[in-house]
Each structure stands twice: as C-alpha cells, then as structure tokens.
Image: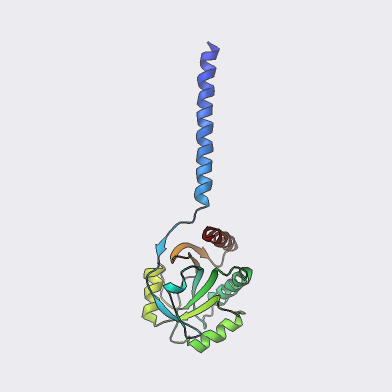
Amino acid sequence: MKMKIIIPAALGLLILFSTALWVIQKAGQERGRLPLLYELPSFEFTTADSQKFGLNQLSGKISLFDFIYTSCPGPCPRMSATMAVLYEQFSDAAQVQFVSVSVDPGRDSLSVLRRYRRQYGVIDQRWFFLQAPIEAVIRLYEEGFHLGGFLPVEHSTKFILVDDRGRIRGYYDSTDAMSMNILRTHIVELIRMMK
C-alpha cells in the first residue's frame, strides 16, 4: 500500500522538479536576449565636421544615442560626462560608436558642437555630435526614438542602444548607476552577437 502512494508521489515530485528546472532555464535564456523595440526611420543629419550622418552610418555599428544641447544648465553636462566614460571604456571596441543629437540646433552651430565635443575628450570618429533643423530633430526624437517632452528643455535623459541594423534594443537611465551597468552588459552582448 505504501509503495502505491510513494511511487506516484515521487513521480509527481520528479515532474514538478523537471518543470521548475525548465522554467528557470527558459527565464535565463530570455534574460540574455535583448528585445527588438523599434526600427529607426530614415534620417539625415549633419555631424560637427559637416559630414552627413544617417541610417547608413549605423550599419555594422552598435550605436549609443542621447539627446542634449550645449547650453543646457541641467542634465546635459552629466549625461555627456557619463557618455565620455563609456566612450573611454569602449575605446578598444571599433564596432561601438556614440551619437549625441542636439535638440537646440538654433544655438548649437557646428562650431559650437566641435567646441563642446573637445570638452569631453573626443579625439576620433567614434563619438558624433549631430545637428539638423528642429523639425527633423523632433520627428526623429518622437517618431523614431519614441521619446516625449517639449524640446529643448524637457528632453529625455535616457541613453538609447541601437544595434548594427538600426534597431532600438534598449533605453537606459543615464543618471542611474545600475542602469549604466546593465547598459555596459548589453553593449558587450551586442558585440558578441555581431561576431
């Protein structure tokens, strides 16, 4: 009689244990995958060096975007300083580039953007500062990156990770250390996926 109870109970526990293992394994796999959030639309902006920059320049590169303006008295200097740390940390990763888009093109002329990038130690073609007419900036900001807020003052403080095919893979709070750690992990993961 006891064996009739023990065998089904043991079998039930084995099934429960196997199911739990499967769920844990699946969760681990999903955590390792970056979501595909949005595809960026076509755009064409101008770099601080008067070069065109659009979707073609994202192809084959992992890009980290932010939206700033050089006369910003609030979060922009902190955002740029954080971006500068990432720029330095990934200096050996040729497939990673950084892109800062001005949300105040009326004041942020190309020469102002060149001066601003020098403040943050940009010495190569891995960190681009972009400018475009405000209508194009708003379109890309709202429809491409799905961000909100009245520009320039209420611009987002998020960093946006874009893969080598122009697809948004994540948004990260530039003011939060934990979020920046996750971002670093995700950049490394995308580099690995490109190999």
**Is 195 above or below relative to 64?**
above
Residue drawn at the location 51% of the way across and 48% of the way down: 29
Q: Is residue 73 above or below residue 26?
A: below
The vertical placement of 18 against 57, above or below, is: above
Looking at the image, which residue is at 54% across and 18% down? 6
Give percent across and percent down for residue 163: 48, 64
Q: Quick one: which residue is furthest to the front in this view?
A: 195
Which color scheme is applied? rainbow
Residue drawn at x 45%, y 56% is: 35
- Residue placed at 52% from the left, 80% from the top? 72
- Residue 90: x, y in percent? 61, 68
Residue 88 shown left or right of residue 56 in the figure: right
User: Which quadrant, please, contains the C terminus?
Assistant: bottom right
Q: How many marks?
A: 0
Picture quadrant where residue 183 is located: bottom right
Q: Residue 61 in the image: state x and y as whole percent.
A: 50, 68
Instruction: Pick whichever, 178 or 115, lies toward us.
Output: 115
Quadrant of the image occupied by residue 79: bottom right
Residue 52 spot, x, y in % from top left: 44, 81
